[in-house]
C-alpha cells in the first residue's frame, strides 16, 4: 500500500501561496513547483478550499490564493483538510472472531492508532505555514551563500 502524499503536497502548495501573497497562482504553475500533474494539485486545492485555507478566482488573471495569515495555518490544519483521520488502515475484512487475537485485535489497534494520530496532530500543530516558509527561505539563502 502506498502512503498518501496529500499532506506533503498541501504544505508545499500553501507555502508557495504564502511566498506569492501578492498574486494568484494557476494550478499549472503550482503543479510545476510540486512537479506533479495539475489534476493532483487541483484535487488537493479542492480539499484546501473546502477547509477555507485557499480561494480561487476564475478568468484572466485568476488562480489560487491563500486565505488568512500563514502564521495562523498550522500543519495540523493542513492534515485535517487533506487526509482522512485513519492514519493506519485496519484489516480489510474483520478478523476471525473465534480466534482469541482476532476477536480483540481491532479494538486494541484502534486505541493505539488513535493515540498515535493524536501525537502526530499535536506535533504538526507546533508548525505553521509561516514557519515552513521561513525555513525554506533560510535554506535558499544558505545555498546562495555557499
Image (spheres, rainbow, N blue to C red):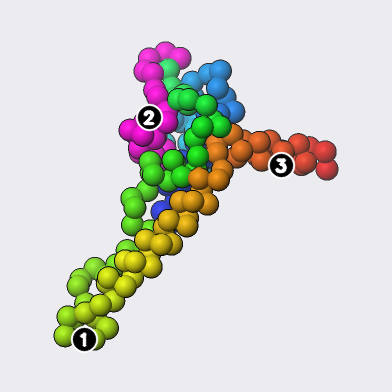
Res 39 visible = no
Residue found 38% across the figure and 29% down from its top: 52
Examine the structure image and report whether residue 28 is included in the region drawn in magenta: no
Q: Which quadrant of the rendered structure holds the C terminus?
A: top right
Q: Within 10 Å of the Cα at label 3, are there few (<14), some (14-19), or many (20+) other Cα atoms?
A: few
Callout in the foreground (1, 3): 1
Give the labeled residue for mark 2: 52
Q: On residue 58, which mark appears? A: none
Mark 3 or 2, nearer chain start: 2
Give, as a single range, the part of the protein colored magenta: 40-61
The extreme top residue here reads 60
- Magenta stretch containing residue 55, yes or no? yes
Residue pictured at 36% horizontal, 18% vertical? 58
- Image location (x, y in percent) of residue 51: 36, 34
| Res 19 seen here | yes
Residue 114: percent from the left, percent from the top? 37, 61
Q: Which of 88 and 126 is in front in this view?
A: 126
Of the numbered discs 1 and 3, the one sitting upstream in the chain is: 1
In x, y percent, where is residue 143?
76, 41
Is 61 drawn above or below residue 40 in the view shown?
A: above
Q: How far apart are marks 1 and 3 (CA)?
A: 53 Å
Q: In the image, residue 40 lies at what x, y percent?
A: 39, 41
The residue that appears at 38% across and 68% down in the rendered structure is 112
Q: Name the residue under label 3.
A: 139
| Mark 1, residue position | 99
Rendered image quadrant of residue 22: top right
Cα distance between the residues tagged 1 and 2: 46 Å
Q: Quadrant of the N terminus?
A: bottom left
Amino acid at each position: 500500500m502506498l502512503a498518501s502524499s496529500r499532506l506533503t503536497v498541501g504544505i508545499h502548495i500553501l507555502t508557495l501561496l504564502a511566498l506569492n501573497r501578492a498574486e494568484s497562482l494557476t494550478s499549472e504553475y503550482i503543479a510545476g513547483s510540486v512537479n506533479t500533474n495539475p489534476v493532483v494539485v487541483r484535487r488537493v486545492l479542492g480539499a484546501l478550499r473546502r477547509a477555507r485555507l485557499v480561494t480561487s478566482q476564475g478568468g484572466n488573471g485568476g488562480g489560487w490564493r491563500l486565505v488568512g495569515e500563514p502564521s495562523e495555518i498550522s500543519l495540523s490544519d493542513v492534515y485535517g483538510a487533506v487526509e482522512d483521520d485513519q492514519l493506519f488502515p485496519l484489516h480489510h475484512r474483520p478478523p476471525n472472531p473465534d480466534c482469541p487475537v482476532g476477536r480483540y485485535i481491532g479494538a486494541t489497534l484502534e486505541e493505539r492508532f488513535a493515540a498515535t494520530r493524536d501525537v502526530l496532530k499535536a506535533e504538526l500543530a507546533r508548525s505553521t505555514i509561516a514557519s515552513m516558509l521561513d525555513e525554506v527561505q533560510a535554506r535558499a539563502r544558505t545555498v546562495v551563500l555557499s
